[in-house]
Amino acid sequence: MPETKCPSSIILVSGGMDSLVCAAIAAKSDPNMAFLHLNYGQKTEKKERAAFHAIADFYKVPEALRKEIDISFLSQIGGSSLTDSKISVKKYKGETGEIPDSYVPFRNTHIISIAVSWAEILGAREIYIGAVYEDSSGYPDCRPEYYDAINNLIRVGTKKGNISVTTPVITMSKDQIVKKAIELFAPLELTWSCYAREDQACGVCDSCALRLKAFQTAGIDDPLDYKVRPRYQ
């Protein structure tokens, strides 16, 4: 067996298109990436996990540099339609300026903390996450100031203080992310975005709607199969 080289970066790969584009960007400079996937009790975890491994296969990430961590205790805390069986996944209602019930309280901090711990073991210095500022009105942990704060915490709270979180798509719109994926020959057909279903994307939850709208704005056909495929303005 060939020796696995130490990666310089860890990519947080949910299975969605934002994290896919992060992987595609990172692969340009570090083909020896590590991939991390978190099960936080989300309703579509089985499908997201399959997407994670399909993307890892595409980028030839060895098994030794793929890690899945279970943090499904977040479903015990509840409070999100993604993790709480008592809260249904809602249909997209357009921009409201309110934090949607799909927000998983402080989720990204749990995820990043685990990535930092693994980075210290591997010797990796960058952690890529597909946070998008366009989502920040709904998700507080997608704001640039959040990443400024978390990077300062990592600097003072780790052994060498040389690990940082990188957010390469944070200033992109969703349609720009789609176009970037095409530019980098990233396999969008392997991703999964739906919050509600695992057999066929619903087409009407927040995540499906934003994805479909992005593809429609970009003038590109979404390769996923949808139960319904509305036109979004």
Image (tube, grey):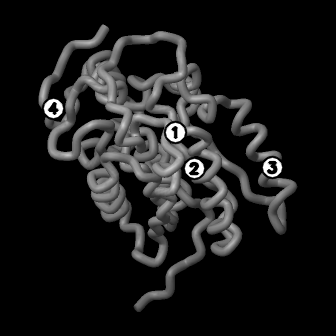
- Number of labels in the image equals 4
Say which mark, if any, is on residue 80.
none
- The picture places residue 52, in percent across and down from the top left corner, at 36, 57
Q: Where 119 sits versus 183, above or below?
A: below
Local SS, label 2: strand
Task: For the N terminus, give its image quadrant.
Answer: bottom left
Q: Residues within 10 Å of mark 2 (few under 14, many from 20)?
A: many
Q: Nearer the viewer, residue 228 or 104?
A: 104
What amino acid does circle 1 point to? Val
Circle 3 is placed at which residue position?
A: 153
**Element type where label 4 sits in the image:** loop
| Quadrant placement of the C terminus | top left
Q: Are marks 3 and 4 in contact (CB under 8 Å)?
A: no
| Mark identifier at residue 104 | 1
- At label 4, the amino acid type is Tyr
Quarter of the rendering containing residue 222? top left
Location of residue 10 in the rendering, given as x and y in whole percent from the top left corner: 56, 60
